[in-house]
Image (cartoon, rainbow, N blue to C red):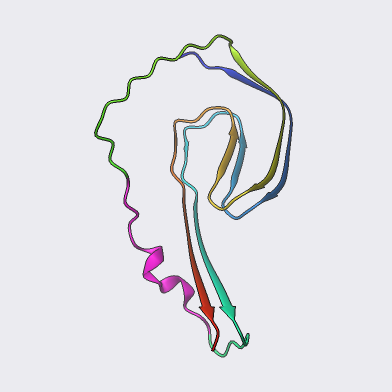
């Protein structure tokens, strides 16, 4: 497969979160990871350190889908380049990728534990 050239007039990104990737150019692959903990309390009193990342949600394996069928694809590039006038992005989230170019693989993971304590 012949490489293609990406031509973009302008890119505007308002915000990027933790472990987000903005990449211009080609790459082999991405593997961004993000762990988060959100705690809502009625009375925000903290008397001792919270052991927030010991929860099993951060350590359990995530099941991967198994592809059991062959996929046939026929692709024909009618132009040696991809042209875009402009791109406007409000936000790139945790463990997300925005790329202008090509990549071989992307494997992202974001885990968030949200606890609400209203005593």
- Looking at the picture, tell me which residue is in the foreground, 19 or 83: 83
- Looking at the picture, tell me which residue is in the foreground, 15 or 30: 15
Image coordinates for residue 34, horizontal then vertical, percent:
51, 57
Q: Residue 86's image quarter?
A: top right
Task: Tell me if residue 77 comes above or below residue 8 in the rendering.
Answer: above
Specify whether residue 37 is painted magenta.
Answer: no
Helix, strand or loop: magenta stretch: loop
Q: Left or right? Give the position of 65 relative to 103.
A: left
Specify the farthest residue to the front.
118
Image coordinates for residue 33, horizontal then vertical, percent:
48, 53
Residue at x-position 52% and y-position 64%: 36
Q: Residue 13's image quarter?
A: top right
Image coordinates for residue 48, horizontal then vertical, percent:
53, 88
Task: Tell me if residue 97 comes above or below residue 5 in the rendering.
Answer: below
Image coordinates for residue 40, horizontal then vertical, percent:
58, 77
| Magenta part of the chain | 49-64
Task: Tell me if residue 67 comes above or below residue 32 in the rendering.
Answer: above
Residue at x-position 58% and y-position 10%: 79
- Looking at the picture, tell me which residue is in the foreground, 16 or 75: 75
Question: In the rendered view of the protein, which quadrant contains the N terminus?
Answer: top left
Specify the farthest residue to the top.
78
Specify whether residue 61 is painted magenta.
Answer: yes
Q: Left or right? Give the position of 69 relative to 44.
A: left
Residue at x-position 32% and y-position 47%: 64
Image label count: 0
Question: In the rendered view of the protein, which quadrant contains the C terminus?
Answer: bottom right
Specify the farthest residue to the left.
68
């Amino acid at each position: 497969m012949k490489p293609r050239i990406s031509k973009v007039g302008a890119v505007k990104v308002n915000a990027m979160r933790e472990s987000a990737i903005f990449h211009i150019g080609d790459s082999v692959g991405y593997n961004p990871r993000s762990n988060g903990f959100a705690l809502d309390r009625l009375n925000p009193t903290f008397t001792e350190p919270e052991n927030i990342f010991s929860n099993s949600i951060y350590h359990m394996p995530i099941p991967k889908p198994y592809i059991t069928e062959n996929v046939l694809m026929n692709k024909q590039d009618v132009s040696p380049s991809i042209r875009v006038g402009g791109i406007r992005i409000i936000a790139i989230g945790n463990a997300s990728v925005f790329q202008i170019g090509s990549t071989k693989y992307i494997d992202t993971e974001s885990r968030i534990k949200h606890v609400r304590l209203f005593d």
